[in-house]
Image (tube, rainbow, N blue to C red):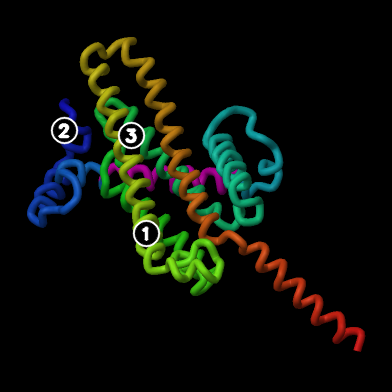
Amino acid sequence: MDHHTTWWSFLPLYQSVQEYLNHYKPLVGPQHFLVHHVFTTAVVVILLFIMALMVRGHFSNTNQAVVPPSRFGIVALFEMVVELVMGMMSNIMGPKNARRYFPLIGSLALYIFFSNLIGLIPGMAPPTDNLNTTAGCGIVVFLYYNYQGLRTHGFGHIAHMANPVGAWWGWFLAPLMFPIELVGHFARPLSLSLRLMGNMIGDHAVLFSFAGLVPILVPLPFYALGFLVCIIQTAVFCILSTVYIALAVQGHEEHEEHGHGEAHGHGKPAHAH
């Protein structure tokens, strides 16, 4: 089994899909890996769905929900991921915003982590070593944080790109700053995609090379290193995504507090009157 072959290659349906996609000449990535990442992504999504149902069943029982699991398993794994991701997000954007934007970052963390892990299985390759997969995640983050920025600040989200300083004299630099800021924003999903893809390609190539040469004992340190890379790359993607969201919605809590303060201020004279 060479580096262009995975266990999916032995499925008749795999070959049919590959021939179908070859006919349409996909623009990104070799056709083989395009088919591979579609199959593996489907497997990861199904596994996550099943595990989510198991965790939901555990927490739906009130007596079990308040008792920590006695041994490490699916429930303990999900609890650990939630705690780590929430802690990371709270440190970056505060507890309130962390709870608000956790569904996206938590979903990305689980999907990317398990997609990376599947590459440690002999004869498999992670879907995150394909630009189609990583670009999809990066584009979702790009659209999401811009949507949240527009929802929070309206036109101010666009105006900030033209005048990042916020001072009146900053508008004189708008013709220069706006294109630079625009390029910087479009570079974000590209950097997220290429970083994750490049690291997973390198990790899988090293692991495959040593496992192919000496399949017993020698690859074990590289499996441990590969597991560490899976964790680090998941963390890097989620941290950067959280930072982008925080930058887009920064000042939201201050605006809300200011708005509540004005409301209470108007309310007092009315009440006194």
Q: Position of residue 81 (x, y in %)?
A: 54, 39
Q: Amino acid at mark 2?
A: His
Dot 2 surroundings within 10 Å: few (below 14), some, or many (20 or more)?
few
The residue sitting at 39% across, 57% down in the picture is: 185
**CA distance separating discs 2 and 1:** 40 Å
Left or right placement of residue 246 versus residue 113 in this view: right
SS at badge 2: loop
The label shown at residue 180 is: 1
Q: Are marks 2 and 1 in contact (CB under 8 Å)?
A: no
Question: Residue type at mark 1?
Answer: Ile
Assign the C terminus to one quadrant of the image.
Answer: bottom right
Spatial separation of the CA atoms under disc 3 and disc 2: 18 Å
For residue 50, say whether it is visible. Answer: no
- The amino acid beneath tag 3 is Asn
Residue 43 colored in magenta in the image: yes
Residue position marked by numbered label 3 in the rendering: 199
Measured in 3D between alpha carbons, the distance from the residue under mark 3 to the one under mark 1, in whole angstroms, is 27 Å
N-terminal label among 3 and 2: 2
Q: Residues within 10 Å of mark 1 (few under 14, many from 20)?
A: few
Which residue in the structure is indicated by mark 2? Answer: 4
Q: Earlier in the sequence, mark 3 or mark 1?
A: 1
Point out the frontmost of discs 3 and 1. Answer: 1
- What type of secondary structure mainly makes up the magenta span? helix
Position of residue 230 measured from the top left corner of the image (x, y, whole percent): 41, 32
- State the residue in front, 233 or 52: 233
Indicate the quadrant where residue 226 lies.
top left
Task: Report the span colored magenta.
Answer: 39-58
Residue 201 located left or right of residue 263: left
- At mark 1, the secondary structure is helix
